[in-house]
Amino acid sequence: MSMIRVVVAYDTPNDKARKKMSDFCLDYGLDRYQYSFFTGVLKPVQLRGLAKALRPFAKDGHITLIPISADDWENRIELGEGKLPDDR
């Protein structure tokens, strides 16, 4: 089964929902890139499962799941030396 690179970004004013969304992303094996921005490689069934798990939180905010080709990911440009939230 093929794997898909995915980017997940979300925004919500609800602290409890934000923590739960973060936990779901981490539980699915995604890596935190910024406070509300995760990336990783998932099977298509996992991507659908994550979308289903996150759906209830969309009523108070916004969630985006973006599949990205391996070539596009390899061609990304990253700027800055800032630490990720989990690097403290």
Image (cartoon, grey):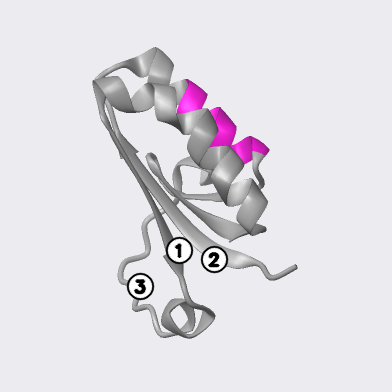
Real-space Cα separation, disc 1 to disc 3, in angstroms: 18 Å
Amino acid carrying mark 2 in the image: Arg
- Above or below, 24 against 42 in this view is above
Residue 56 x/y as whole percent: 41, 22
- Quick check: 1 left or right of 7? right
- Which residue has dot 1 on it? 67
Q: Secondary structure at mark 2?
A: strand
Dot 3 alpha-carbon crowd within 10 angstroms: few under 14, some 14 to 19, many 20 or more: few
Q: Which mark is first along the chain, 3 or 1?
A: 1
Residue 43, picture quadrant = bottom right
Query: Residue visible at 53% across and 30% down?
Result: 53
Q: Specify start and end residues of the magenta stretch as a single range.
A: 20-27
- Asked if residue 18 is among those painted magenta in the image, a careful observer would answer no
Q: Main secondary structure of the magenta part?
A: helix
Residue 34 x/y as whole percent: 39, 48
Dot 2 alpha-carbon crowd within 10 angstroms: few under 14, some 14 to 19, many 20 or more: some
Amino acid carrying mark 3 in the image: Glu
Query: Residue 13: in sight, yes or no?
Result: yes
Q: Which mark is first along the chain, 2 or 1?
A: 2
The answer to whether marks 1 and 2 mark residues whose Cβ atoms lie closer than 8 Å is yes
The answer to whether marks 1 and 3 mark residues whose Cβ atoms lie closer than 8 Å is no
- Which residue has dot 2 on it? 5
The answer to whether marks 3 and 2 mark residues whose Cβ atoms lie closer than 8 Å is no
